[in-house]
Each structure stands twice: as C-alpha cells, then as structure tokens.
Amino acid sequence: MNEERHGGIGLLHYLELLLAIGIGVTAVFAYLLVKHKSLVWGTDGTSLYLSFGVLEGKLLRGFMGKVVCAILGEEAGIPPDLSTYTLHLGFGGDVSLLCSQIYDPFNILFGFFAPRNAETCYAILIYVRAMVVGIAFTKYALGHTQDKDAIFVAALCYVFCGASVFS
C-alpha cells in the first residue's frame, strides 16, 4: 500500500536516498566545511548569486512586512528600493537580466535569513537542491524501470555528476 502511493517505491527508499545524498554532499564539500571555508564559489557566486540572494531576501522581508502591516492596520513605512539598474549585482547591469534566478522558488528561503547569514542560506540551498534533484530523478526513472536498486544508484549518479555538483 505504501509503495503504491509513492509510485512503486516505498517511503523508506526515499529516506535512504535523502540520507545518502546528505552524506554524499557533506563528503564532497568536507574539505571546505572542515576548513570553515565558504560554499559560495568564485566571482559568480560572491558577486552575483549571493548578492542577489541578499537583495531578494531584503525585498521579500520588505514585502512581507508591508503585508503584515496591512493586515494589522499599521503604517507600512518606506518600501525597499526597486531600482532597475544596479552595480551591486554581478558586474552591474539591468536587474531583470541579472536576476536569472528570480523564478527559483527555493530563493524564498533567503527571506528568512538576515543578510549576514546569507552564506548559511546558500549552503542550505545546496543540500536542498541536491535532495530535490534526487527525488525528481527517482520519480522520472520510475516511468522507465521498476528496479529499485538501479533507480537508487542512478539517482545518486545523477545528483553527483559534474554538472550538478559544480553548478
């Protein structure tokens, strides 16, 4: 019965997959974690993705603050700056072009972290995205085979392929 609800694979399989992915991601980034280094990589990571996450968190907190103030009937205050051109993201440019990840629903998590903790949020998102990729691949593979062991190994290979790990 449990296997029918989850597309032929039981909930235990998904939990084992998530555990294996969590251990694998930790192993891949163990050197950085032990040396207390950031998981934010290179120029793109620090100047574009992390700074956009901070901006998106600021915008989300400002928007939610306005919603809460409207519900409570209080003065909402000054809205956050919504400029269309900025030099604070990447190497500067049009915000709509720079914010290529604006449609990523996981970036909502940045709204719950203060700007000083954005790097922690970025690291958490690495784990979350890897786990979601593993589950999504498992669901996809179920349409092609019912061999649970093959799907498990294939999902791990897909999650830890170079394009996934280094993106």
Image: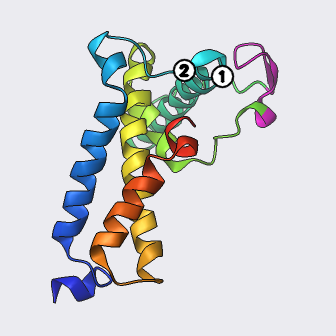
Secondary structure of the residue carrying numbered label 1: helix
Amino acid beneath label 2: Trp
Q: Are marks 2 and 1 in contact (CB under 8 Å)?
A: yes
Q: Give the range drawn in magenta.
A: 84-97
Residue 140 % position (x, y):
47, 74
Residue 102 % position (x, y):
64, 42
The image quarter containing residue 139 is: bottom left
In the displayed structure, 75 sits above or below 104; it is: above
The image quarter containing residue 123 is: top left
Q: 150 and 104: which one is in front?
A: 150
Binning the other alpha carbons within 10 Å of mark 2 as few (below 14), some (14 to 19) or many (20 upward) gives few
Q: How far apart are marks 2 and 1 (CA)?
A: 7 Å
Residue 158 % position (x, y):
47, 55
Which residue does the numbered mark 1 point to in the structure image?
Answer: 44
Does the magenta portion include 154? no
Residue at the (63%, 48%) spot, across then down: 103
Secondary structure of the residue carrying numbered label 2: loop
Q: In this view, does 24 lie to the left or right of 16?
A: right
Binning the other alpha carbons within 10 Å of mark 1 as few (below 14), some (14 to 19) or many (20 upward) gives some
Which residue does the numbered mark 2 point to in the structure image?
Answer: 41
Residue 87 % position (x, y):
77, 13
